Amino acid sequence: MFSIIEASVGALFIQLASTNYYWQLGSTIGFSSAIYNTIFEKATKNIPLLTGVLCSSLFIKEYAPSFLPDFPTSNLITNFGIDKLVLFSIAGALVGLGTKIGAGCTSGHMIGGLSRLRVRSMAAVATFSAAAIGLNKLLDLGLHSAVEPNYTLVLSWGFFKENKLITGLLIAGFIQVYGLLPYLSQKAKGFYKCLLGNYIRFLSGFLFGVGLHVSGMVNVTKTIGFLSILDWKKFDPSLAMIIV
């Protein structure tokens, strides 16, 4: 279902994370490159960013378990008999290869690139989106078991009352990203500037991870639903709020 409130709140978290990273550190947030550089280039500066993402999962599991993703059995497993571990390994390798060749991932190109009108990012987003939509249609991965079509709009204004901790975290994020951290970045010197830089990386990773969970981007049914635009009944436009 088109859960516009959850998707929009998650998108705001992701926007805060990418804005914070770009404003304070002068570069776009990109998790594929962060993982690659940490493993192969021994770049320790990315460790706080990745730690923030991991901590966001622990936070969601402990305090907002309703946003934990579900992992339905893939048609590739049931129809083609592919082992789950093999399937995930192939998928991960292809994503890694693609982001290496394309010099960026979804976070780098779609969020950090489109917002700055980078032509290279426009080309990258158009390419990986078209490939994913086409492959989803070809392999019939669309998931849909509801009575109503996936595009049916669900306006759940009770979200803010039911998720007070998430709402409070969003407000705190706005205060830090648009007020406190720019001020501290101008004042901090030496050791404190280094310490602040690590906190900024950690906060960006944490906010980004929370946004992924709240918006549904880690939910397989949401992602495949969004890629099912060629099969209208299965199409779930929720993740369009991330791009917007």
Image (cartoon, rainbow, N blue to C red):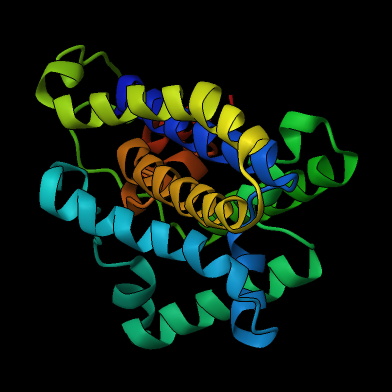
Across and down, in percent, residue 177 comes to: 51, 29
- Determine if residue 237 is in view: no
Does residue 61 appear to the left or right of 192 in the view shown? left
Q: Quadrant of the N terminus?
A: top left
Across and down, in percent, residue 217 comes to: 41, 46
Is 184 in front, or is 139?
184
Q: Residue at x 87, y 46 (%)?
A: 120
Q: Quadrant of the C terminus?
A: top right
Across and down, in percent, residue 78 comes to: 29, 74
Does residue 189 appear to the left or right of 138 in the view shown? right
- Determine if residue 14 is in view: yes
**How many circles with numbers are drawn on the protein?**
0
Does residue 214 appear to the left or right of 24 in the view shown? left
Q: In the rendered image of this protein, does residue 39 appear above or below residue 48?
A: below
Q: Residue at x 35, y 27 (%)?
A: 172
Is 31 in front, or is 94?
31
Across and down, in percent, residue 45 comes to: 61, 68
Is 116 in front, or is 223?
116
